[in-house]
Image: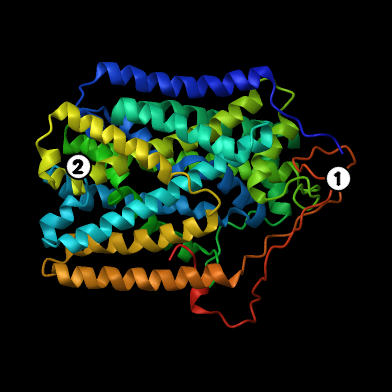
């Protein structure tokens, strides 16, 4: 078995140049912009449409897309690709129904709307706390994913990778504010796209052409795009994926602080709507690229599954393994790949830090006389301090699955509260609080039950018939790691309530 291939000098230079460029963007906007909270949190409300649209996309796709979607395609086929269809309905709905309400209110924090609509401080505080928990945990996920890839391809440990990523994102966000975050997101989106295109091209070369990717995937049962079964207990079918992601995209693009904050940074409502609608083709393009990466990797290893051969320890390592195994002959490409993964993480972490600062300042500190009386420059430095402290919230690694379930349990009820306020004119604050608490309790019951059951989906079959002897491994030990996938529920078993689709 061949020893793991690692980074060369050129790879480190490519990777380091992306980090350095992100930091320089922050420094540039720190010296060029005004030292006020309006500049730090909203970019002076005069941002351009295209970079804001790209920033919104990069914020919510992140490194989880680059590692998670290819692994999903590889293990379970193309059903997950259906998620892009929901964008065609959710984003126009956000642009027409949600965004105008928030924009006319001139918000900095999206939770200000709840105070204006319901005049209930308890409701606002509950939603703020929910967002703080959700965003902190999501940042932990976004940090874990690229750090795993970085530790697999370099000599850095997982802990060191996590700290390096978080420190870089915190520095340029803290010194440059929203403008630095947006323009760094543009750079990072370009790097992400280039990295995924490189994987698809290499996969096409490996199997003798782009069309053969689909041919080989179909032969092995991966082209299972449409399944019109009607069952909420089934992990993936057309209906639960479409409607699950319809609500998820509407929540993320419509009432999430990171998205709303960017809409508010644009000079007119027309510009905000345009940025929102541009996210449909942008997200479809990047999600499709990630799905194609998964099919290209599967086609390459259709007869030699690295997971079954214990060449990798978990499915999240499929993409880094492919890059080191198949692309190391091209100097600098492994560095581009890690820069691609790191770019996804930086965009998510920086946006999360900036939105946490906006929420903390606008919903808590701005109502205290001591902070109200400060000069605009002093207030901006307080906001920078909040961003620095939010860095600590991103250090919640090692809770990947729990964080994902908690995030889902919190965002749905909060979206329900905003939807109630916008569409039900006779709803009041007490009813909204009761509904929110009930929904949070039910969501917690479902996700804790599902997480505690240990049940995981059974992946589609793979093969090791074509494996040779000279194989590259990312596993440090020569002893194969345990491949315990957990108990798998068969179709004959009676479904339990907490086995409902994770998107719901």
Q: Residue at the spot x=33%, y=51% of the render?
A: 132
Of the pair 236 and 43, the residue shown nearer to us? 43
Considering only order in the chain, which callout, 2 or 1, is on the residue closer to the N terminus?
2
Q: Answer above or below: position of 170 versus 300.
A: above
Q: Residue at the spot x=67%, y=38% of the render?
A: 152
Q: Answer above or below: position of 426 versus 110.
A: below
Q: Dot 1 corresponds to which residue?
A: 467
State the image coordinates of residue 258 (x, y, percent, origin top left): 31, 43
Of the pair 328 and 119, the residue shown nearer to us? 119
Q: How is the image coloured?
A: rainbow
The quarter holding residue 373 reads: top left
State the image coordinates of residue 456 (x, y, percent, origin top left): 62, 66
Classify mark 1: helix, strand or loop: loop
Q: Residue at the spot x=67%, y=44% of the render?
A: 318
Q: Answer above or below: position of 448 versus 461.
A: below
Which dot marks residue 108? Answer: 2
Is 429 situated left or right of 355 in this image? left
Q: Answer above or below: position of 25 versus 87.
A: above
The answer to whether residue 330 of the structure is visible from this angle is yes
């Amino acid at each position: 078995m061949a020893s793991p291939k690692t980074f060369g000098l050129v790879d480190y230079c490519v990777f380091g140049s992306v980090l350095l460029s992100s930091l320089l963007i922050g420094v540039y906007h720190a010296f060029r912009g005004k030292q006020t909270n309006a500049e730090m949190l909203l970019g002076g409300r005069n941002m351009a449409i295209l970079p804001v649209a790209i920033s919104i996309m990069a914020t919510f796709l992140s490194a989880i897309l680059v590692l998670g979607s290819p692994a999903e395609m590889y293990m379970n086929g193309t059903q997950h690709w259906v998620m892009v269809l929901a964008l065609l309905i959710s984003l126009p709905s956000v642009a027409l129904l949600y965004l105008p309400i928030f924009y006319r209110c001139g918000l900095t924090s999206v939770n200000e709307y709840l105070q204006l609509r319901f005049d209930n401080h308890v409701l606002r505080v509950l939603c703020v706390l929910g967002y703080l928990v959700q965003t902190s945990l999501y940042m932990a996920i976004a940090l874990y994913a690229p750090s795993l890839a970085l530790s697999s391809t370099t000599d850095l440990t997982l802990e060191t990778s996590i700290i390096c990523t978080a420190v870089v994102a915190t520095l340029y966000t803290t010194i440059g504010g929203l403008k630095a975050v947006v323009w760094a997101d543009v750079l990072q989106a370009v790097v992400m796209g280039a990295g995924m295109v490189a994987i698809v091209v290499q996969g096409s070369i490996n199997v003798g052409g782009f069309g053969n990717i689909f041919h080989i995937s179909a032969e092995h049962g991966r082209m299972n795009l449409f399944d019109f079964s009607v069952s909420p207990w089934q992990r993936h079918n057309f209906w639960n994926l479409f409607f699950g992601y319809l609500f998820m995209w509407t929540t993320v693009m419509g009432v999430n602080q990171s998205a709303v904050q960017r809409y508010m940074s644009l000079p007119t409502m027309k510009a905000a709507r345009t940025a929102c609608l541009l996210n449909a083709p942008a997200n479809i393009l990047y999600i499709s690229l990630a799905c194609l990466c998964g099919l290209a990797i599967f086609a390459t290893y259709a007869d030699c599954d690295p997971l079954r051969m214990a060449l990798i320890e978990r499915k999240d390592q499929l993409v880094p393994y492919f890059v080191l195994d198949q692309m190391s002959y091209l100097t600098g490409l492994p560095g581009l790949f890690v820069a691609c993964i790191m770019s996804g993480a930086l965009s998510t972490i920086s946006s999360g830090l900036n939105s946490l600062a906006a929420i903390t300042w606008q919903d808590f500190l701005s109502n205290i006389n001591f902070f109200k009386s400060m000069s605009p420059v002093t207030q901006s430095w307080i906001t920078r301090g909040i961003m620095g402290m939010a860095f600590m919230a991103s250090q919640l690694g090692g809770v990947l699955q729990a964080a994902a379930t908690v995030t889902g349990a919190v965002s749905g009820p909060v979206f329900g509260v905003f939807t109630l306020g916008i569409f039900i004119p006779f709803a009041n604050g007490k009813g909204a609080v009761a509904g929110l608490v009930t929904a949070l309790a039910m969501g917690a019951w479902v996700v804790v039950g599902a997480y505690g059951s240990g049940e995981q989906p059974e992946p589609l079959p793979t093969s090791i018939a074509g494996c040779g002897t000279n194989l590259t491994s990312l596993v440090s030990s020569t002893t194969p790691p345990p491949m315990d996938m957990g108990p798998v529920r068969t179709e004959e078993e009676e479904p339990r309530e907490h086995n409902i689709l994770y998107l719901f």
